[in-house]
Image: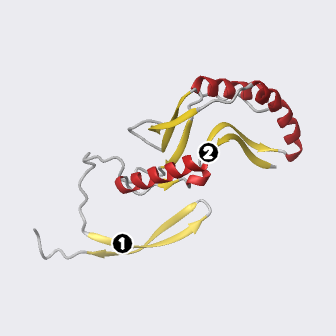
Amino acid sequence: MIRAFLAVELSCEIRQHISSFQQQLKETLPPLNWVRPESIHLTLKFLGSVELSCIPQLLSVLKPIADKTDKFSLDVQGMGVFPNRQHPRVIWVGVLGQTQRLQRLVLDVAAALEPLGFPLEAKAYHPHLTLARIKCENGVLESDHHLGTLTVDRFILFQSDLNPSGACYMPLAAVLLSTSRSD
């Protein structure tokens, strides 16, 4: 079993331009999980787990699609985020140009693979090249919403046990702060 997807590979020149663009963004954005330029591609269809023995059949249904699809050009440009600007999780570069031909290719591939057990996508295809992933807000968004006032009159010594389900904290001792001074 292998994990597989179908994608368009980028030229060396585009990879170099993407690398330079990422460097510029790194100077203005907080730390993010950047995708290595050599790993960036234009996904057509994510397949998931595929049996090695199914690959010849998969290729045989894709060949007629490739045979009837003329080559076309796309411009790599534009920038956006998924799912939205309020809660960004992915920073991407888009593609412009002959996108209707790209969309047709994606639809043809999906239709050919569905009888082989690869379901159609529930969401519309949005062609993009992922530049970075945002695992947490990481300073990308700021808020001054007041959540309450914490009175610090002690600190606690906790024991931390790591379990498969996560860390477990147990208080061992409380250290009270001095009450002789009041501000």
Quarter occupied by residue 153: bottom left
Q: Which residue is mark 1?
A: 156
Task: Residue type at mark 1: give it.
Answer: Ile
Image location of residue 69, percent across then percent down: 73, 26
Residue 150 is left or right of residue 183, and the answer is: right
How far apart in space, not on screen, are marks 1 and 2 (Cα)?
Answer: 54 Å
Circles 1 and 2, Cβ within 8 Å, touching? The answer is no
Q: Nearer the viewer, residue 75 or 27?
A: 75
Mark 1 or mark 2: whose residue is earlier in sequence: 2
In the rendered view of the protein, which quadrant contains the C terminus?
bottom left
The secondary element bearing badge 2 is classed as: loop
Q: How many marks?
A: 2
Residue 175 is left or right of residue 21, and the answer is: left
Near mark 1 (Cα within 10 A), the count class, few <14, some 14-19 or many ≥20, is few
Q: Which residue is mark 2?
A: 10
On screen, residue 152 above or below 19: below
Image location of residue 84, percent across then percent down: 43, 36
Query: Which residue shows up at 50% across the image and 71% down it?
Result: 160
Image location of residue 68, percent across then percent down: 77, 24
Query: Which residue shows up at 48% across the image and 37% down it?
Result: 77
Near mark 2 (Cα within 10 A), the count class, few <14, some 14-19 or many ≥20, is some
Query: Which residue shows up at 46% across the image and 53% down it?
Result: 20
The secondary element bearing badge 1 is classed as: strand
Q: Residue 25 — which label? A: none
